[in-house]
Image (cartoon, grey):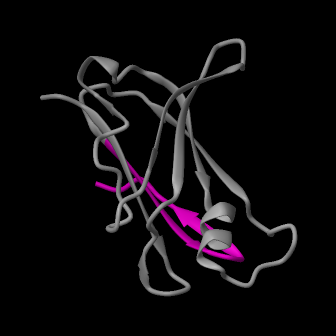
Amino acid sequence: MTGKLTTHILDISIGKPANGVLVELVRVCPNKKIEIIRSAYTNEDGRLNHPLLEGDSMKKGIYELHFYIGDYYRNRGASTEDPSFLDCVPVRFGISEQYSHYHVPLLISPGGYSTYRGS
């Protein structure tokens, strides 16, 4: 069995997937510095076209997903504060089982967000 890391974003303010959101995956190194591993944009379904990590790249450790939702709302022409209340939403999590599927969904609105470990 091969492990993988996936995500998706739902915009609960409109009840639809969030298309065109930049997502960065970073590894938090033991010295607390971060290393950018990959970045991609969500598709029409609010998902990435490929897993962020898969196979041999799935390693135990501490990671962060950076979701650039401020840009998403500005690009949609949504009325938000200046500056936006939420701009880049970081979600820090650990991978302890490199052969498991880790799914980190994000539910967003201009004034808040929620996440959980999905399946």
The residue closer to the viewer here, 98 or 34, is 34
Decide: is 15 above or below 21.
below
Decide: is 85 above or below 51.
below
Q: Report which quarter residue 43 is drawn in.
A: bottom left
- In the rendered structure, the answer to whether residue 88 lies left or right of residue 50 reads right
> Given the current orientation, which residue lies at the most extreme left position?
1
Q: Position of residue 80 (x, y in %)?
A: 77, 79
- In the rendered structure, the answer to whether residue 76 lies left or right of residue 50 reads right
Q: In which quarter of the image is the C terminus?
A: bottom left
Q: Report which quarter residue 4 is drawn in.
A: top left
Residue at the (52%, 47%) spot, across then down: 23
Q: Quadrant of the N terminus?
A: top left
Residue at the (84%, 77%) spot, across then down: 81
Q: Position of residue 94 (x, y in %)?
A: 50, 33
- State which region is magenta: 102-119
Q: Where is residue 72 in the image (x, y as percent from the top left)?
A: 60, 66
> Given the current orientation, which residue lies at the most extreme top position?
31
Decide: is 26 above or below 79.
above
Q: Report which quarter residue 17 is drawn in.
A: bottom left
Residue at the (65%, 13%) spot, across then down: 30
Residue at the (50%, 87%) spot, across then down: 14
